Amino acid sequence: MENLEITELPIPDITDNEVLVKVKAFSINPVDIKTRLGRGQASRLKEYNPIILGWDISGVVTKTGKSVTSLKKDDEVFGMVNFPGHGKAYAEFVAAPGSHLTLKPANISHEEAAAASLAALTAWQILKEKVSIKPGERVLIHSAAGGVGHFAVQMSKYLGAYVTGTSSGMNRDFVLSLGASEHIDYEEQTFEAVLKDIDFVLDTIGGDYIDRSLKVLRPGGTIISIPSGAAESVSDKAHAKGFNGDTFRVQSDGRNMKEIADLLEKGIVKSYISKVFSFDDIHAAHRQIESGKTKGKIVVAF
Ligand SMILES: NC(=O)c1ccc[n+]([C@@H]2O[C@H](COP(=O)([O-])OP(=O)(O)OC[C@H]3O[C@@H](n4cnc5c(N)ncnc54)[C@H](OP(=O)(O)O)[C@@H]3O)[C@@H](O)[C@H]2O)c1
């Protein structure tokens, strides 16, 4: 596969603020594929070429830097490491800032924890912090069956919203099972013809989905667009029509990871993992995400 090779490297050194994690599972996100192909985070990481891809890990702490007080050896931890930046998560050992990780709840697997890193953090930082969804608000989640979307549906529901999710008909029952009250099959229905008075749209697709989504917002409603590139015009387009609109980029944050860990521990949010790959099968894992049809998350487990 273009730009993706497995190789042997020494175990990384850690700085005072880092811990060394023996990785049990890591997850794959669309940004990994974009970065491999020279987009995504590639320009930011030019100086490190070749890079070690990946940002989402779950594993066991084997060593702690002397300034790390929140974690200790043998702790089971998970989180999104150094995003934006060089995560180096596709590896058996990862040096991670202690402040980017949190303790893995004992009642979820390393696979489930790794899956609930970048995608869950994106949904949570948008819904809880950037937009602050209130009970009773009407929320539209595009790609509700995907990595970000399946967490966003569950979290919106938890925050008290009335949730509509879009996916193909194949994933209708899955989206409803996550807590959506309404489902729109994008292959059969034009969502802007059937929805109105939406308070918040999470746009995971960009392009004409921005213009189409603006048609369903209530006056003063909000759209956040997360795909890179296609989304830059969202704020101009939204403001021109009296809406709020912005792009968003997820940031590593152990405090938010702890909030997600609590939701996972209580069973309020669950990771749906459609496939676990072996490390040697990483190329197949990338092809799966490239398909654009991944249900929930995929992870690589050691
Ligand atoms: N800015 C940020 O911080 C940030 C963070 C995370 C992700 N992202 C970006 O957000 C996008 C989504 O990420 P992701 O991890 O959720 O991707 P993903 O898991 O690969 O998304 C796959 C899902 O998209 C659904 N889908 C495809 N076309 C659709 C359509 N027209 N309408 C509704 N659903 C559709 C598929 O459902 P069906 O199989 O049913 O079609 C599938 O379940 C990517 O571009 C990613 O790079 C940005």
Image: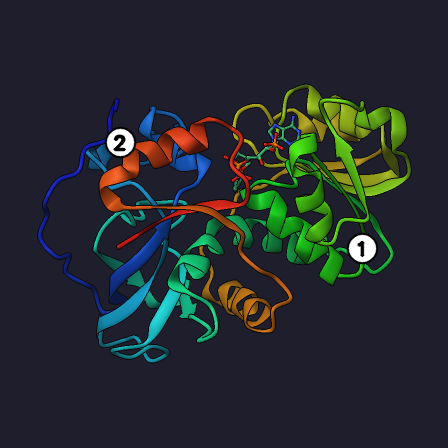
Quick check: can you spot residue 17? no
Please state if 253 lies on the left or on the right of 2 as rendered. Answer: right
Residue found at x 56% / y 68%: 259
Residue found at x 71% / y 22%: 187
Position of residue 256 relative to residue 65, above or below, is above
Which mark is drawn over residue 46?
Answer: 2
Q: Amino acid at mark 2?
A: Lys
Q: Classify the position of the N terminus by image quarter.
A: top left
Which mark is drawn over residue 83?
Answer: none
Query: Which label's residue is closer to the chain start, 2 or 1?
Result: 2
Q: Position of residue 190 (x, y in %)?
A: 80, 23
Number of marks in the rendered image: 2
Q: Helix, strand, or loop for circle 1?
A: loop
Which residue does the numbered mark 1 point to in the structure image? 161
Q: Classify the position of the C terminus by image quarter.
A: bottom left
Q: Position of residue 246 (x, y in %)?
A: 67, 37
Q: Position of residue 215 (x, y in %)?
A: 84, 27
Quadrant of the image occupied by residue 62: bottom left
